[in-house]
Structures are given as structure tokens and as C-alpha cells.
Image (cartoon, rainbow, N blue to C red):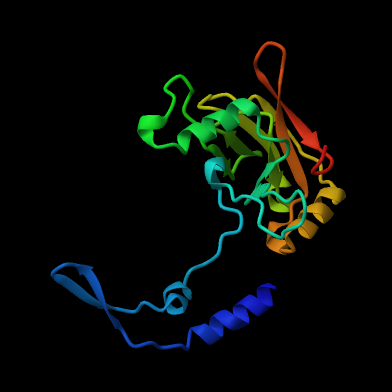
Amino acid sequence: MPDNFTEWRNKFATITTTPQLVVLDDNLYSMADINPVTRLKDVTRRPTPELVIWDLAWRPEEPKGGPPGWEKRFFYWLYLRKPIPDDVKEQIDNSLKDKEKQDSNIPGYVAEEARYTPTPTSTNSIRILKPNDYMGYLLKDSWLTKGIEVFVGNGDKPIWSNTVKEQQKLREETLNARGDPNLQFSAMIYLEKKTDGTWDVREAQSLDG
């Protein structure tokens, strides 16, 4: 896939287009190249950005005629490993209503957010801004060359620091799921709530466990 992508990007680089008249406002006009191919040919794809924000309110529904039970569970290196809890569904449904129809007694929905930070020290870090037990965090080979520290919320101390084991089954599952070598992952961690209300970190051996 990468070689094919490079080949086509080089072909598109030779494309020239005639600028078109673009209406910016009632009395404002401009000449611009509106061909999306030429506008995007210099854009570099980042399949695993360090910061990922996933607003589940805009997660696509099951496509008509699609495979039974299909749902979008991957978003870059985030993975929806469990069904969305009912209280979160309620928040999402409420957020999609017109503002005047929203129930003020229902907490506002906050999008899933996580950041991976490579460091020059002996560990890399992952910060989970919205800790929960239904989201999994997929890790690439290059992220596992050092130990991983996990932070939750805005805490300044890690709740967990350890090396993460590679799992061959996860490699196979993530490659089969999306067919993209750039979105193949070899490990996954997730949070589990302890009886005292704090969080612990678990390593998964597969997407289902």
C-alpha cells in the first residue's frame, strides 16, 4: 500500500489546474485552485497522531446493507472495547438535541481524548483525559521500545509505569480489521476501576480481552 500511495502521489504532483473564480462574499471574489487533488498532494498522512479526540456523538451508524452488527469501534489508536454505557449514551443523545430542548439535569458529554508523548527518558507516556473502562488504547511497536507511563485526567503523577508485552494476536486482529499496515498494533492497554474509585491499568491479549 505505501508504495502504491507514493506512486499515485507522484502522478498527482504533475497535475495542473486552471484557477477558478470563487465567491467569498457578496462583493468579494478571488481566483483559487479548487481541485482537491492538487490542494492535498503535499499533505502528509499521519495514521497515528499523538493526540486523538473522538467525539462518539458523531460516530457513524450501521450502514444500510452492511454486515450485521457492524459498528465503528476504531478511531486511530483508540478502540471501543465495550458497549457505550447507558449514562454516556444518555449524555450523547442529550447533546445532539437543540440547545433549548436539552435536559439541564444530564451532565454534558465530553469527547474521548488521549495523548501519546514520546520522551528522551526511559519511558514514553499516555495521558487519558477522560478515564473510563470502555475504551482501549492501541500501541505500536515503536511505542514499546521503552516502558509506558499512564496518566489520567490532569494528574501530574502516573498511575502506572511498566513495560508492555507485544501480542501477536493483536497484530493479526488489527491488521485484519482495517487492512492497513500503518494501523497495525501489537499491544493494547485499558483502564479498570478499583473499589476505591481510582484506576488501574490492564494489558489486553486480544481485542476482546
Q: Please, is residue 80 above or below residue 12 in the view?
A: above
Give the left or right position of residue 148, taking residue 118 as reference: right
Q: Residue furthest top?
A: 196
Where is residue 66 shown, x and y percent of the image?
72, 59
Q: Quadrant of the C terminus?
A: top right
Residue at image position (48%, 76%) is 41
The residue that appears at 49% across and 32% down in the rendered structure is 94
Percent from the top left, x then y, of residue 20? Answer: 30, 82
Q: Quadrant of the N terminus?
A: bottom right
Figure check: 142 above or below 204 = below
Depth order, front residue of 173/186:
173
Rendered image quadrant of residue 125 = top right
Residue at 58% x, 35% y is 127
Q: From what the image shows, is residue 3 above or below residue 143?
A: below
Closer to us: 68 or 33: 68
Q: Residue at x 45, y 88 (%)?
A: 15
Judge whether 196 appears above or below 128 on screen: above
Q: Looking at the rendering, which quadrant does residue 149 occupy?
A: top right
How many numbered discs?
0
Nearer to us in this view, 17 or 83: 83
Q: Position of residue 2 (x, y in %)?
A: 67, 73
